[in-house]
Amino acid sequence: MAHLEKYTQADYPKLLMHYERAKNTNGEYHKFRNQDIDLSRTDQNYNVAAGFQTLSQSEFMDKRLGQLKIFKRGDVKYLCDWVVTLPKGMEPEERRFFDEVFRFLSDKYGRKNIVSAYVHKDEARPHMHFAFVPVAMDEKKNREKLCSKDIIGRDDMLAFHDELDAYMTGVFGYDTGVRNGATVEGNKSIAELKRGTAVKELNAKREELAAVESTIDDLKCGDRIEPVKEKRDVVVISKADFETAGNALTKVKLSDKKMREGQAEVKKGVDYRNQIFRQSDEIQKLKAEISSHESENRRLNNRLLNIQNVFERNPRFLESFLQFAKDLERERENEERALQAAKRKQRQLEKGEMEM
């Protein structure tokens, strides 16, 4: 569902072109590994990171790499790319799915290292390229360095899908199909999974009961039961056949008990599902409020970053802005003093008229 690619200094510029669907000198879209691109759907592509990343991909790479210690070796990886494919069955939640994957990966690798997060819908299957600069801390020199091995080692690769799966399940409340093979039967809620397990156990008990009943039917056959003595309406059978029938009846009772236990488990699953449904409205409201707060927070952060960028690029503008703020404050103070003086004069005039 997700796989990682790493690129050297010589390779990563071509990938940036692929992400944003830039054209080459011949006016053709840059392809990656000869993938087929449906140009009629290219306008549906979008960049999840566009909300806070104001620089172009190449500008950001130049700026961020200039802040890092970089070892002079040909195999150094300058760019990492998690390619996350939309699982089957998640099409109605596509944008939210990629937004949550972006949030998970941003927290994991640091927002200040994100290059872009383009979602491609013009290829075989919708997928997101989460591109980032692999930045680690050089503890000896107390500065940041470019080092993908320190950020994504073997253990990190092995644990990645489990971590992402746990995060996405916690957000959506059901299996989103992050792990391979998890979407064969579609997305199921936790309650549905529990109920499905109980039903399987109940069916197994029913099969066991059918086998026991079949044994009892066999015991009823005339060639298996030898009448010893007939008295009134009572048939006396051999001890061996009696013990066999007794054992079969015991199994029936045990099987019936297990079946009732299985039915009880099914009822528990149904009750749990109903409880989830009763709480779903409140959960949706809380999620909507959280989403609204997060959107407002992102909007304010974006405005702050834009203002900071303006001031960083134009130091004199910052001085002018501060001077303008001082002048504006001074004007407000003068207006306030003039207003207070006018009020005092008005009160004096009103007092004089009353004395007359």
Image (cartoon, grey):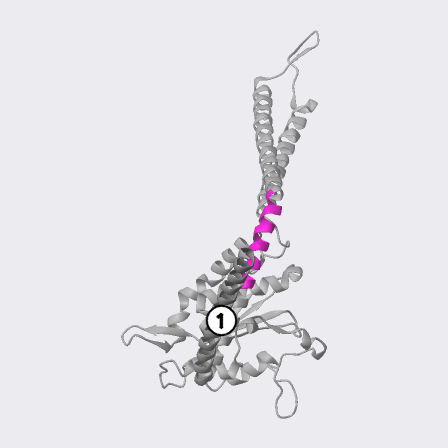
- The residue at the far top in this view is 232
Question: Is residue 232 one of those drawn in magenta?
Answer: no
Viewer-side residue, 166 vs 124: 166
Query: Which residue is depicted at the point 46% across and 77% down?
Result: 327
Up-down relation of residue 233 to residue 161 (above or below):
above
- Give the main secondary structure, helix, strand or loop, of the magenta stretch: helix
Question: Is residue 288 one of those drawn in magenta?
Answer: yes
Viewer-side residue, 18 vs 104: 104
Q: Is residue 71 left or right of residue 161?
A: left
- The residue at the far left in this view is 140
Residue 201 visible from this viewpoint: no
User: Residue 277 at x, y = what percent?
Assistant: 62, 43
Point out the image quarter for the N terminus: bottom right
- The residue at the far front in this view is 356
Up-down relation of residue 187 to residue 346 (above or below):
above
User: Residue 321 at x, y = what percent?
Assistant: 47, 79
Which amino acid lies under the numbered mark 1 shown in the image of this protein? Arg
Residue that badge 1 annotates: 332
- Which range is magenta? 279-296
